[in-house]
Image: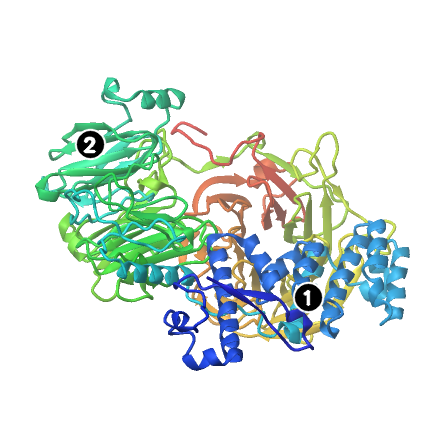
């Protein structure tokens, strides 16, 4: 039962009055009778003492606390289950917890009605001065946005209906806001001259509101959610159910609990539990599938079956890289298949491999396909692979298979889309986990995986410990060990990301260690320790969430790598197994403790099928395409082989030192070495309906003829070694630029100089806008320091020191909340983007004392990697640990003049001082296309001209622009629409 009480509070806080219903559903409460409270007391031994029953006030106080805690548990449950809207309603109606993150989200997206509605559950504008300030700031921002959008009718409505209530306290301010209605642009008003774009303004307002809310006494104790262990409500329910089960007259070993609405009572069993009850199955059915590496019991060879997304299956000998067997998918006996399978195959003949697995003795391997079929192959040594058995196993895809051998009888166990699973544990894509017996009585246990994640499960090889790994729809990953007897989490392993881009895969090694592929490395834990033991990078080149699989003995590790490669690593014992002498090749990855040292011993297994199915841990397409032809760098020596456009300019400029596209993709900005900033824009017309930058239609060089300045010009100095630099704000409205003298902040729309910053002691050499707040600028200087400067307040925020040479590269990451800097000392430093504390560093190259050579840096579009460029080095580094994923060194060839990622991150465009442009695959930095500029530029161009700067289009991955030493800018893209720079060439191709 439950009861309610009217909670009385102080008169000073009338908003806190509400009816609270206290319900504790985990214990068997009885209603109070006329003879006293004895029956209530015996069910509440931990909550209410005998003394408190006689003291009604004390009892009420305790139950009020418990009722409030129950609300917090329900809020946690709703968040974990994904019922976010219901959680927000409960927060507002209870008034116990103010969700600052939700409120911030509403303000940032401009949902002012929703923000006020949510806020009204906690305070009204007349409650105190802090509440008044909160409501005023929100309504004022809504008013300014309406004016900025030229929606004067809406602005007038806000002024008279929403802001009028504040006029009595500040009539002068209200009149001033009324006068804004007469202005064509609110920035014409003196106090709003620095008003930026809407996004920036909202960010500033949010920070101000958060400070006011925390200072408001009404919100004290309501802003921070209490620290509660995950799934606490479920744990209490499980404890209650266990207690109920213990009270049963005839408790059964596997209780079938299907409801919480009534108390659980065990019923006597009606059938004898069939065989296999105590069988130990080393692997669980799961939605995660991989291929396996095994030491064959027949030949002693180490073999790896591989499946592709087109249904092809092949068998590889790992030590030699030799393919022993391969073939396309085909049905062995169509007459034996069901009509459902025939119909599905007729509608869609495509077939892919979901799983390939070995039997325990290595004599048989099975292949699970995406439609109905499981095929079993018998291996008789060498390249003798024979068809053994074909099973039309499921209606729909066969998601996983495993082998078991109880009583020396080999069984294959499968799970599929039809939900027919003959296995101990099964998982579904919505994060539900069930435990089964080998009968038709349904699941014995039904509970949810952490975060309702799509989960895979596995036992240790001794069958004693059960683990699962899954990634939720929000990207949070969980690696846990389960207590099977209670269906509860026994241990949670730390070190996985909160925002993973894909599902994390895992495997278990020698009953002692568990490994998972994440953040482009393999993370390893000791099963008895929550923290990461070590990581293995396999010499780089791994995707963000690589597939991994150990062989049975734990001596070999297969890892899915980028570009459809597979890397096989071996321990010392694995090297002996493969007959390889020595203790590894170049670059080993050591796992401390009792795990062996793993060496990269194999990367070159070639498949001849189509793209590899990542769910089936398939092998390498390395240097060959799917036709078997090798890819060679395509050299373009004729203008007809690409489209190029020389941008028109009637301004006398020198070398183009800096180049950038506008974020909308319709403009290019360039900074010449003589201090002139040039802006080209592509018009929308019949030849260019999108208005995007293109090599087919020439743009217009923008000049403001009605303005006091026709061009944006920097102040020059007498120093011939001054380094020009500039940066464009995220909204394309502001350009900050310097050529060794004052730093100028230009309004790109009017070309007016908004702010001039005089360097206190040293010239600026590099500039970057903060990604969230356009008022904050990072200024790299010649004296090796970095200045963070607030242009709106015209003051220095901080000075960062750590480099020993001038700053040559700055890059912010909004996702990782970091600033990365590089200098002429070839050193990379990482700073926190909020408090600008130093977080890490790495020296890229050893440079002799007294020699300075600039190093530049850029974030990959997905923010997980960095492109670092020096004239003698180009590398792709992990943004998390600054480890090198790929590198390219010119050697004796010409130096690099600059490089940039393409907008999709798949390519790197690099300029060279010999007048060529190279196009590289970003994952491996393999050169696959080279363009000699003097062959595609007009004949008047000098052979000495080379690209001094380079920029990639923000929306077209195949378009880039180069700024030349001659002062010209050229836009280059492939010859036809939809064509790629990647060209497959045969031996006789040009």
Is label 1 in contact with label 2 (beta carbons under 8 Å)?
A: no
Towards the viewer: 667 or 468: 468
Residue 177 drawn at (x, y percent): 86, 62
Callout 1: helix, strand or loop?
Answer: loop
Measured in 3D between alpha carbons, the distance from the residue under mark 1 to the one under mark 2, in whole angstroms, is 72 Å
Residue 566: image quadrant is top left
Q: Which residue is identified by label 2?
A: 376
Q: Residues within 10 Å of mark 1 (few under 14, many from 20)?
A: many
Q: Is residue 118 left or right of residue 410?
A: right
The reply to whether residue 689 is visible in this rendering is yes
Q: Which residue is mark 1?
A: 740
**Quarter occupied by residue 719:** bottom right
Tell me where residue 660 appears, x and y as whole percent: 64, 51
Looking at the rendered image, the disc whose residue lies closer to the viewer, 1 or 2, is 2
User: Quick one: SS at disc 2?
Assistant: strand
Q: Residue at x 75, y 50 (%)?
A: 652
């Amino acid at each position: 039962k439950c009861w309610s009480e009217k909670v009385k509070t102080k008169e000073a806080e009338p908003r806190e009055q509400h009816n609270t219903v206290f319900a504790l559903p985990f214990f068997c409460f009885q209603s109070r009778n006329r003879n006293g409270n004895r029956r209530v007391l015996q069910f509440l031994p931990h909550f209410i003492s005998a003394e408190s029953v006689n003291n009604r006030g004390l009892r009420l106080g305790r139950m009020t606390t418990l009722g409030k805690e129950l609300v917090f548990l329900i809020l946690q449950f709703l968040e974990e289950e994904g019922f976010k809207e219901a959680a927000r309603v409960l927060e507002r109606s209870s008034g116990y917890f103010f969700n600052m993150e939700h409120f911030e989200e509403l303000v940032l997206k401009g949902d002012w009605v929703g923000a006020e509605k949510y806020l009204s559950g906690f305070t009204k504008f007349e409650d105190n001065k802090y509440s008044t300030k909160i409501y005023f700031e929100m309504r004022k921002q809504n008013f300014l946005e309406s004016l900025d959008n030229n929606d004067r009718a809406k602005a007038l409505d806000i002024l008279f209906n929403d802001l009028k209530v504040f006029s009595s306290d500040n009539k002068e301010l209200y009149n001033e806001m009324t006068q804004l209605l007469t202005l064509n642009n609110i920035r014409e008003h003196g106090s709003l001259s620095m008003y930026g774009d809407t996004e920036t303004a909202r960010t500033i307002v949010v920070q101000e509101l958060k400070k006011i809310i925390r200072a408001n006494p009404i919100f004290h104790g309501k802003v921070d959610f209490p620290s509660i262990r995950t799934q606490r409500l479920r744990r209490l329910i499980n404890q209650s159910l266990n207690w109920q089960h213990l009270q049963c007259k005839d408790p059964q070993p596997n209780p079938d609990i299907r409801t919480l609405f009534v108390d659980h009572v065990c019923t006597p069993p009606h059938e004898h539990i069939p065989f296999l009850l105590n069988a130990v199955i080393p692997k669980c059915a799961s939605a995660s599938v991989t291929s396996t590496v095994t030491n064959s019991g027949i030949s002693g060879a180490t073999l790896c079956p591989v499946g592709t997304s087109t249904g092809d299956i092949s068998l590889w000998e790992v030590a030699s890289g030799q393919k022993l067997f391969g073939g396309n998918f085909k049905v062995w006996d169509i007459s034996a298949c069901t009509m459902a399978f025939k119909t599905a195959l007729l509608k869609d003949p495509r077939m892919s491999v979901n799983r390939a697995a070995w039997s325990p003795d290595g004599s048989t391997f099975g292949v699970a396909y995406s439609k109905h079929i499981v095929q079993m192959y018998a291996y008789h040594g060498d390249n003798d692979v024979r068809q053994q058995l074909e099973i039309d196993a499921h209606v729909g895809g066969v998601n996983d298979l495993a082998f078991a051998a109880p009583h020396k009888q080999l069984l294959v166990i499968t799970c599929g889309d039809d939900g027919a699973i003959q296995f101990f544990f099964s998982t579904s894509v919505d994060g539900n986990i069930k435990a089964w017996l080998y009968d038709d009585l349904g699941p014995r246990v039904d509970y949810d995986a952490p975060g309702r994640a799509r989960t895979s499960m596995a036992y240790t090889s001794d069958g004693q410990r059960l683990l699962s790994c899954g990634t939720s729809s929000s990207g949070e990953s969980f690696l846990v060990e389960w207590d099977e007897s209670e269906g509860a989490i026994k241990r949670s392993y730390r070190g996985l990301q909160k925002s993973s881009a894909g599902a994390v895969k895992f495997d278990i090694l020698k009953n002692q260690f568990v490994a998972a592929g994440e953040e482009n490395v393999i993370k390893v834990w000791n099963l008895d320790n929550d923290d990461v033991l070590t990581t293995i990078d396999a010499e780089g080149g791994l995707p963000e969430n690589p597939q991994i699989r150990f062989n049975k003995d734990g001596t070999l590790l297969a890892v899915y790598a980028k570009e459809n490669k597979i890397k096989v690593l071996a321990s010392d014992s694995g090297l002996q197994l493969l007959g390889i002498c020595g203790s590894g090749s170049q670059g080993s990855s050591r796992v401390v403790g009792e795990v062996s040292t793993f060496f990269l011993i194999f990367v070159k297994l070639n498949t001849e099928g189509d793209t590899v199915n990542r769910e089936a841990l398939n092998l390498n397409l390395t240097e060959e395409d799917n036709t078997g032809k090798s890819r060679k760098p395509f050299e373009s020596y004729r203008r007809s082989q690409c489209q190029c456009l020389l941008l028109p300019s009637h301004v006398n400029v020198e070398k183009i030192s800096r180049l950038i596209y506008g974020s909308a993709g319709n403009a290019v900005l360039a900074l010449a070495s003589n201090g002139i900033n040039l802006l080209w824009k592509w018009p929308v017309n019949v030849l260019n309906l999108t208005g995007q930058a293109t090599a087919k239609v020439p743009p217009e060089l923008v000049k403001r003829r009605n303005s006091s300045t026709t061009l944006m010009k920097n102040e020059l100095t007498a120093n011939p070694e001054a380094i020009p630099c500039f940066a464009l704000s995220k909204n394309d409205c502001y350009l900050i630029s310097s050529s060794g003298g004052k730093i100028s902040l230009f309004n790109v729309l009017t070309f007016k100089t908004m702010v001039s910053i005089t360097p206190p002691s040293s010239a600026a050499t590099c500039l970057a806008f903060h990604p969230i707040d356009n008022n904050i600028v990072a200024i790299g200087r010649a004296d090796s320091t970095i200045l963070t400067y607030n242009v709106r307040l015209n003051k220095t925020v901080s000075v960062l020191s750590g480099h020993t040479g001038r700053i040559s590269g700055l890059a912010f990451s909004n996702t990782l909340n970091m600033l990365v800097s590089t200098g002429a000392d070839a050193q990379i430093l990482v700073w926190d983007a909020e408090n600008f504390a130093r977080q890490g560093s790495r020296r890229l190259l050893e440079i002799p004392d007294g020699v300075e050579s600039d190093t530049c840096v850029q974030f990959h579009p997905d923010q997980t990697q960095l492109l670092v460029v020096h004239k003698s080095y180009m590398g792709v580094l992990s943004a998390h640990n600054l480890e090198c994923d790929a590198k390219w060194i010119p050697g004796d060839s010409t130096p690099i003049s600059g490089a940039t990622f393409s907008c999709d991150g798949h390519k790197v465009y690099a300029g060279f001082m010999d007048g060529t442009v190279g196009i590289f695959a970003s994952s491996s930095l393999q050169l696959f296309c080279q363009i000699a500029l003097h062959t595609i530029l007009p004949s008047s161009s000098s052979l000495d001209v080379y690209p001094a700067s380079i920029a990639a289009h923000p929306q077209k991955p195949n378009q880039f622009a180069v700024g030349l030493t001659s002062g010209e800018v050229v836009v280059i893209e492939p010859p036809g629409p939809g064509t790629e720079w990647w060209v497959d060439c045969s031996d006789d191709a040009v």
